[in-house]
Amino acid sequence: SVVRHYKFHVVKKNTTRLCNSKPIITVNGKFPGPTLYAREDDTVIVRVVNHVQDNVTIHWHGVRQLRTGWSDGPAYITQCPIPTGHSYIYNFTLTGQRGTLLWHAHINWQRATVHGAIVILPKLGVPYPFPKPDKEEIIIFGEWWKSDVEAVINQAMKLGQPPNVSDAHTINGLPGPVSICTSKGYTLHVETGKIYLLRIVNAAVNEELFFRIAGHKLTIVEVDATYTKPFQTDTIFIGPGQTTNALLAADQSIGKYLIAISPFMDTIVATDNQLGTGILRYKGIVPFSTTSLTAMPPRNATPVTTSFMDSLRSLNSKTYPANVPLNIDHSLLFTIGVGVNPCATCINGSRIVADINNVSFVMPTTALLQAHYYSIGGVFTDDFPGNPPIPFNYTGSTPQNMQTKNGTKVYRLAYSSTVQIVLQGNSFIAPESHPTHLHGFNFFVVGKGVGNYDPKNDTKNFNLVDPVERNTISVPTGGWTAIRFRADNPGVWFMHCHLEVHTTWGLKMAFLVENGIGPNESILPPPSDLPKC
Ligand code: C2O
């Protein structure tokens, strides 16, 4: 293993999309930002320099950060933000991880433009557990607002209303369909007979997406930097924060084929019908050949998302075993969803809130990890409820106003204890899907279902052999998902819905994992350049 150095200059860059230019926050002037390349077990050192007026942090989404929570990045959770004119060095080791992940800003809605891919290759000389591709291609999905993204959310928060949906979906930063406003959309160039490994990243702010390439099937081999049993599909379902590696065989007749992404869900945020497109183009096509089109799944096509998620299984080979925790120390039920609370100053007399077990998370002004490490009192309490305050019909059709309470609460876990969380979607306003992300761990997705979780019967159907392992999971619309992990990483770890609007409304909490007693079981001391709050 080696040490790899990167420099991330956070700078404003005037960028033109959809016939309109605006200064956006970028890393090194690029949108999407630079790709971070490394191999399994390498150490990565990224010096982030903040040249913009806003505070900045960068999160390495899916990197486990074993004992190095100081480098995880969520603002006010593991660090105070990097102020303008300052820098901070993120230093972490990619222990036992290989695959595709992403990095993104983790403060306010900055990740709309500040994101990029992380490619972790296997150790030198170690092959992929699937046929060697001829070429690899990174494909990043995003969203573009014509107006300033921070203004969009600030306005929405002031009014207690949903923010505007984005004006376009992008593939590698480029909106499509190609119009007079875009000189060219995204093009994937292929050669007949070759195999491509697509490293697909969903960096969109508020959309879970469907992805298809006309006329082609894709073979899924990895999600969230964990290998899966290969399976073929014509549609990929991918939530924000998730990554999917798929093999594409250029085995169709020479031509042009539409690449398309479309939103899965109608949300209370609003209806977003934007199709994002690009072109798969074979080498040697004749000029002016027409493009083969593809029909996308309809909105709210839960049969498509269900069948995709049901097909995902850990590879669970000898080399890559699935070590699913079998005995559980903490069995938790978390209701997650969006509701309304009274608000005297809001336009409707109410504001939208989101919560876990009726706690809408309030961001602290000192980072939780610092407060924990230095025993600073008054920053958080460790009484986050492991169960909903009152049981009710979570997915019932009668809207329930739960009068959500605000709080900065964590759930405390002993080192190496085992945890099961049933993430139960609630329907306070409407059933929605929530791509839920846990920092600091991978978890196994042992079960899922529609309606209310029933501990007696549903547990019997859990997959404890080869469940998919990931860091972000879509909780089914009007249903639940059960995840398991071992708390073998001391520190403070954020968990939240990766739809940024839901996070902003409070759908977030944190786990505090205590130090163990062994020599390598406690959090490392903070780096000397850790920003102050
Ligand atoms: Cu990719 Cu806390 O997020």
Image (cartoon, grey):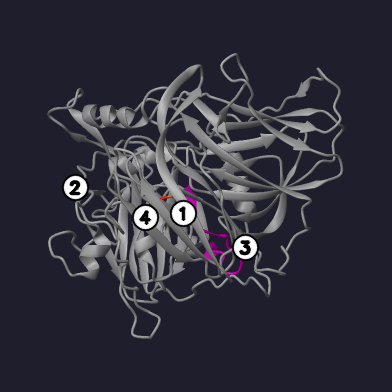
Q: Was residue 468 drawn as part of the magenta stretch in this picture? A: yes
Which is more toward the observer, 238 or 523?
Answer: 523
Which residue in the structure is indicated by mark 4?
73
Q: Which of marks 2 and 4 is nearer the N terminus?
A: 4
Which is more toward the observer, 78 or 54?
Answer: 54
Marks 2 and 4, how far apart at CA: 26 Å
Which is more toward the observer, 421 or 225?
Answer: 225
Q: How crowded is mark 1: few (under 14 residues within 10 Å), some or many (20 or more)?
A: many
| Residue at the bottom extreme, as displayed | 518
Marks 2 and 1, how far apart at CA: 29 Å
Residue 61 marker = 1
Q: Does the residue labelled 4 lie within 8 Å of ligand 1?
A: yes
Question: Looking at numbered disc 4 in the image, what kind of residue is underneath it?
Answer: Gly
Question: From this viewpoint, is residue 457 visible?
Answer: no
Question: Looking at numbered disc 2 in the image, what kind of residue is underneath it?
Answer: Lys
Mark whose residue sits in front, 4 or 3: 4
Labels 3 & 1 near each other (Cβ < 8 A): no
Quarter-of-image position of residue 512: bottom left
Residue 405 marker = 2
Q: Mark 4 falls on what kind of element? A: loop
> Residue 313, position in %: x, y?
63, 59
Which residue in the structure is indicated by mark 3?
314
Q: How crowded is mark 3: few (under 14 residues within 10 Å), some or many (20 or more)?
A: many
Magenta region: 460-477
